[in-house]
Image (cartoon, helix red, strand yellow):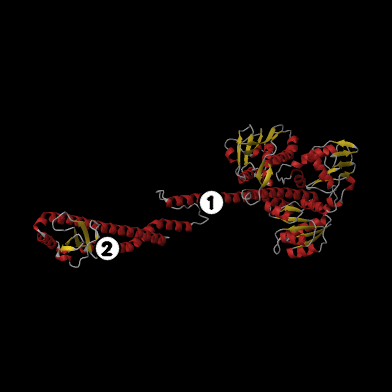
């Protein structure tokens, strides 16, 4: 996966570049808006990480020039500005996702993977991971042909995990998806729902499908199919 | 301003005084004229009497008598004239030479010709064919009086035109002196010395009220600045703890050769510490943004019932895992105007608090209904509660009631309730707390309903 990083801060840029490379991605780093826009217009990357506060050309201008030139590459906006106006403006200007500094690197990684796969993903009515299947129309979940009864929240959680099967999803992403809330409190509201879902889809079945990736989030995948770039999954029982 | 007041005063005084003096002069003129006419009427009566008494003795007797009278009033150039039926002069006193002819009609009103005032009247029946009589006298003496008055009036007006501006300027000086003092004082105020106040003289006039208004404003600004300042200081202070932890973890890591696992543990510790730093910074940012953005940030219609239901669903798992009964009573379709993200934060914070402070196996409740035209959100628990002395401080920034009661893993930043308060107040609402130690707490949020 090819990532174009447009970020003027040397320390953060270096850390992100190194992190992405170690995660198996190819990262091209541009330190100002003009160079960044040139690189973006070349359309060689799968996803763009764009800082909003650039010394020469404001990030939002880079974004709007990309879009007006017909470049549809997914853009994740990175900003130190956390206020709603900036978030709304960013997304309205054609950004696909928004991340406020400081952020967890795992969060960035998870969101980049989600963005890069968004294009390839085709809307589906049925998802299948191993012997687990989910039928969106019938709102039915089965594993090994046994029907599993889920609450609406659990169903929504499983649907999101299955849609992004094999990809680590952060707690924050799950929280945004489930409750439309960027909950930052200390109380971990996601874990309980995940562990309850795990109890229903994994307990009494083999192999386990829903894995906890320490410090990063959760991933749904058959054990034997653990992707190298996601690090060693640590299966967690209750 | 002083010049303007002086000019306006002068104009007002000059117009009023000139009008009054001109009026006075005119009144005086009419009084004089009236006096002349009264004397002329008396003269008519006197001449009539003379005709009555002396007509039997002949015209000469009358002429003698009238000539004598005319001589007595020479300085007034008094004259008398007797006329026959055709208006021809029968006799006239010598002073009547060159006087104007008698008015066409007898019994007319007094008339003025040149400086002579004359009056003609019907003569009493007499054997001398005197049909009517005319008397007259010069108005020059009265005119002299009038001239004198005119000069006095002109002098007075002139004096007023000289004195009024000076007085006006002086009075305006008195009126604006306090204002200038106030201006001087106000312009010497500095943002760093907001405890200074404009002088209040205690007479409750316009200047005192202005000073009072400005002083109140200064008071509010000063409180606001103080709050900001202490918030900044508190925030910086709170940031020290996680920064110190990060720093010491790194120093320990760099302090000597250690095993791979040991490095990993220390780095994970640093990660945990930076996470709490991140949460704190984000909350400080949210707090500073919460109070100010409702006006700017395009408020939308937010279905509070949905927000509450989502919050309940979000915390349902946590509550259940700790065996806390979560009681819900959410009326559908209650909407308010505001910022969804912020309102969500309020409900989440309150519910998080309720669950956090409730013992395992306890009870927490979330209810939303409509009360007196407002959306009323109530979040309560039967947990540890808040002591009476802590109760007034729960919304203070960085205030943490009795840390001992908090489970270690849930210790917050002490900003949650401040954020709730800022958000609620920015939405034109109100948040209150009722609690007794050991009996749980109840938070009530009132928000104006969205108009249909």
Residue drawn at x 57%, y 37% is B389
Q: For this rendering, which residue is in front, B290 or B302?
A: B302
Secondary structure at numbered mark 2: helix
| Residue B307 screen position, x and y as percent | 70, 41
Label 2 vs label 1: CA separation?
63 Å
Secondary structure at numbered mark 1: helix
Determine which quarter of the picture holds residue A55: bottom right
Task: From the image, tell me which residue sits under label 1.
Answer: B221
| Residue B172 screen position, x and y as percent | 38, 58
Q: Which mark is residue B150?
A: 2
Residue drawn at x 75%, y 45% is A175
Q: For this rendering, which residue is in front, B198 or A234?
A: B198
| Residue B355 screen position, x and y as percent | 69, 37
Chain letter for the residue marked with disc 1 in the picture: B
Determine which quarter of the picture holds residue A91: bottom right
Q: Given contact means CB atoms under 8 Å apart, are the residues at marks 2 and 1 in contact? A: no
Task: Report the quarter where the C terminus of chain B lies.
Answer: top right
| Residue B173 screen position, x and y as percent | 38, 59
Determine which quarter of the picture holds residue B54: bottom left
Q: Is B326 situated left or right of B259 in this image?
A: left
**Foreground label between 2 and 1:** 2
Task: Report the quarter where the N terminus of chain B lies.
Answer: bottom left
Q: Is A35 situated left or right of B202 in this image?
A: right
**Residues marked 2 and 1, same chain:** yes
Q: Residues within 10 Å of mark 1 (few under 14, many from 20)?
A: some
Lower sequence index among marks 2 and 1: 2
């Amino acid at each position: 996966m090819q990532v174009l990083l447009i970020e003027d801060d040397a320390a953060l840029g270096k850390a992100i570049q190194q992190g992405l490379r170690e995660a198996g991605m190819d990262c091209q780093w541009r330190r100002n808006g003009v160079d960044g826009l040139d690189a973006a217009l070349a359309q060689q990357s799968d996803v763009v990480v764009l800082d909003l506060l650039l010394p020469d050309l404001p990030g939002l201008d880079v974004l709007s020039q990309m879009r007006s030139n017909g470049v549809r590459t997914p853009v994740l906006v990175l900003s130190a500005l956390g206020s709603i106006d900036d978030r709304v403006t960013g997304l309205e200007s054609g950004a696909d996702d928004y991340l406020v500094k400081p952020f967890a690197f795992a969060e960035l990684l998870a969101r980049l993977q989600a963005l890069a796969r968004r294009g390839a993903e085709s809307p589906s009515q049925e998802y299948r991971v191993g012997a687990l299947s989910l039928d969106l129309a019938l709102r039915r979940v089965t594993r090994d042909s046994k029907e599993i009864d889920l609450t609406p929240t659990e169903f929504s959680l499983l649907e999101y995990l299955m849609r992004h099967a094999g990809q680590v999803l952060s707690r924050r992403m799950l929280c945004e998806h489930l409750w439309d809330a960027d909950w930052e409190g200390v109380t971990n509201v996601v874990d309980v729902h995940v562990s309850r879902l795990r109890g229903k889809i994994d307990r009494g079945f083999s192999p386990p499908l829903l894995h906890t990736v320490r410090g990063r989030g959760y991933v749904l995948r058959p054990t034997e199919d653990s992707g190298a770039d996601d690090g060693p999954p640590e299966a967690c029982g209750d | 301003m002083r010049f303007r007041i002086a000019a306006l005063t002068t104009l007002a005084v000059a117009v009023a005084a000139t009008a009054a003096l001109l009026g006075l002069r005119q009144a005086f003129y009419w009084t004089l004229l009236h006096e002349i006419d009264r004397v002329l009427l008396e003269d008519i009566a006197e001449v009539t009497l003379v005709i009555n008494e002396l007509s039997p003795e002949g015209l000469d007797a009358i002429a003698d008598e009238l000539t004598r009278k005319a001589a007595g009033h020479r300085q007034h150039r008094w004259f008398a004239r007797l006329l026959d039926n055709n208006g021809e002069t029968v006799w006239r006193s010598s002073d009547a030479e060159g006087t104007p002819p008698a008015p066409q009609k007898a019994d007319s009103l007094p008339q003025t010709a040149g400086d002579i005032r004359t009056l003609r009247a019907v003569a009493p029946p007499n054997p001398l064919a005197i049909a009517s009589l005319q008397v007259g006298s010069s108005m020059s003496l009265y005119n002299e009086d009038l001239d004198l008055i005119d000069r006095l009036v002109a002098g007075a007006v002139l004096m007023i035109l000289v004195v009024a501006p000076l007085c006006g300027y002086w009075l305006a000086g008195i009126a604006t002196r306090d204002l200038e003092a106030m201006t001087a004082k106000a312009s010497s105020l500095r943002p760093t010395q907001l405890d200074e106040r404009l002088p209040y003289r205690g007479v409750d006039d316009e200047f005192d009220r202005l000073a009072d208004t400005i002083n109140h404003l200064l008071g509010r600004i000063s409180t606001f600045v103080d709050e900001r300042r202490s918030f900044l200081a508190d925030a910086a202070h709170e940031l020290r703890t996680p920064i110190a932890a990060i720093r010491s973890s790194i120093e320990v890591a760099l302090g000597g050769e250690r095993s791979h696992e040991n490095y990993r543990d220390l780095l994970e510790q640093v990660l945990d510490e930076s996470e709490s730093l991140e949460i704190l910074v984000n909350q400080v940012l949210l707090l500073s943004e919460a109070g100010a953005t409702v006006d700017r940030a395009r408020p939308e219609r937010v279905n509070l019932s949905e927000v509450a239901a989502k919050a309940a669903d979000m915390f349902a798992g946590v509550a259940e895992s700790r065996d806390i009964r979560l009681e819900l009573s959410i009326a559908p379709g209650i909407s308010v105007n505001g910022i969804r993200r912020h309102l969500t934060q309020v409900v989440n914070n309150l519910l998080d608090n309720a669950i956090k402070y409730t013992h395992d196996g306890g009870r927490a409740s979330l209810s939303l209904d409509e009360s007196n035209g407002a959306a009323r959100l109530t979040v309560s628990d039967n947990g540890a509660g808040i002591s009476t002395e802590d109760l007034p401080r729960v919304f203070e920034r960085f205030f943490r009631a009795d840390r001992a009661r908090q489970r270690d893993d849930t210790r917050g930043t002490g900003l949650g309730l401040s954020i709730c308060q800022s958000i609620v107040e920015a939405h034109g609402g109100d948040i209150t707390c009722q609690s007794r130690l050991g009996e749980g707490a109840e938070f009530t949020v009132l928000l104006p309903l969205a108009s249909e």
